[in-house]
């Protein structure tokens, strides 16, 4: 069996299993390649209040309902794009948020896109919005098949990742289901984002902004 098929089978499985398996894989787009160092799993309708599909199918989350292996890209805070790999059985709307990576090819291109005030290659794709910025990913990638060699492509790791390097913990930036330990990262990697528990800000009307 080819790794491409193994990766397809991985994404067809449960979100948390898919997330673990994506660590160490490479993601390439816009002349830049990153090695994934941090990801975050989200289940489908009904059981995961942090999922964009929690309340059912909408024009925004349509691609999440499958089949697996496609890109779910969304815009957040009016300024950032974030990329997810759709996973799980068709109809269940699960996905893995690609949270961070280390740039392994196209560093100069990534630097030009990120325009860091203080040069620090660890920060190029450290966080989901930065990752998309470094790779030049925006809403046009929505619905792209990630395993087909297209403009945004997932590739196998250069070397297998030892299980002892995979750590897990609470998710980041969600108002519901934040304690679910479905954020996975490579232990000791400097490109993994810093964990901060989400604290909703109160608006003048007394309601908190929605979570992820």
Image: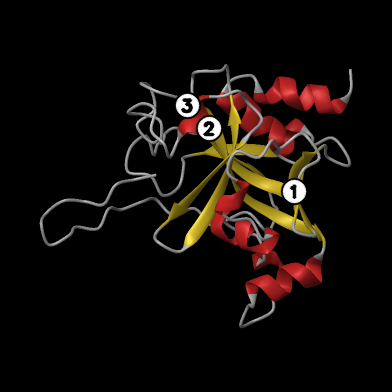
Q: Is residue 29 above or below residue 174?
A: below
Residue 91: x and y, percent?
A: 50, 18
Left or right side of 203 for 151: right
Quadrant location of the N terminus in the rendered image: top right
The answer to whether marks 1 and 3 mark residues whose Cβ atoms lie closer than 8 Å is: no
- Disc number lying in front (1 or 3): 1
The answer to whether marks 3 and 2 mark residues whose Cβ atoms lie closer than 8 Å is: no
Residue 25 visible at all = no
Q: What residue is rendered at 79% in x and 67% in y? A: 107
Gap between marks 2 and 1, in whole Å?
17 Å
- SS for dot 3: loop
Gap between marks 3 and 2, in whole Å?
14 Å
Q: Earlier in the sequence, mark 3 or mark 2?
A: 3
Q: Residue furthest left?
A: 205
Q: Is residue 197 above or below residue 149?
A: below
- Identify the image quadrant of residue 77: bottom left
Q: Which mark is residue 151?
A: 1
Counting labels gives 3
- The residue identified by callout 2 is 63
- Identify the image quadrant of residue 5: top right
- Disc number lying in front (3 or 2): 2
Q: Earlier in the sequence, mark 1 or mark 3?
A: 3
Residue 110: x and y, percent?
A: 73, 67
Residue 104: x and y, percent?
A: 82, 58
- SS for dot 1: loop
- Identify the image quadrant of residue 3: top right
Pick the front one: 190 or 45: 45
Left or right side of 2 for 121: left
Q: Is residue 81 above or below residue 185?
A: below
Residue 164: x and y, percent?
A: 73, 34
- The residue identified by callout 3 is 43
């Amino acid at each position: 069996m080819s790794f491409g098929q193994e990766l397809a089978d991985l994404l067809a499985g449960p979100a948390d299993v898919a997330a673990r398996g994506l660590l160490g894989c490479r993601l390439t787009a816009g002349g830049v390649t990153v090695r994934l160092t941090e990801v975050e799993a989200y289940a489908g309708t009904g059981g995961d209040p942090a999922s964009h599909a929690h309340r059912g199918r909408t024009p925004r989350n349509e691609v999440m309902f499958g089949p697996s292996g496609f890109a779910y890209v969304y815009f957040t805070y009016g300024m950032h794009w974030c990329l997810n790999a759709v996973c799980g059985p068709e109809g269940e709307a699960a996905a893995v948020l690609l949270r961070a990576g280390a740039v392994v090819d196209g560093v100069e291109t990534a630097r030009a896109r990120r325009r860091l005030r203080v040069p620090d290659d660890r920060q190029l794709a450290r966080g989901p919005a930065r990752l998309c910025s470094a790779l030049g990913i925006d809403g046009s990638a929505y619905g792209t098949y990630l395993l087909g060699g297209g403009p945004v492509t997932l590739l196998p790791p250069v070397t297998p990742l030892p299980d002892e390097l995979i750590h897990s913990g609470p998710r980041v930036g969600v108002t519901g289901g934040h304690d679910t330990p479905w954020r996975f990262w490579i232990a000791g990697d400097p490109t993994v984002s810093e964990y901060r528990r989400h604290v909703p800000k109160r608006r003048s009307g007394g309601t908190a902004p929605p979570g992820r």
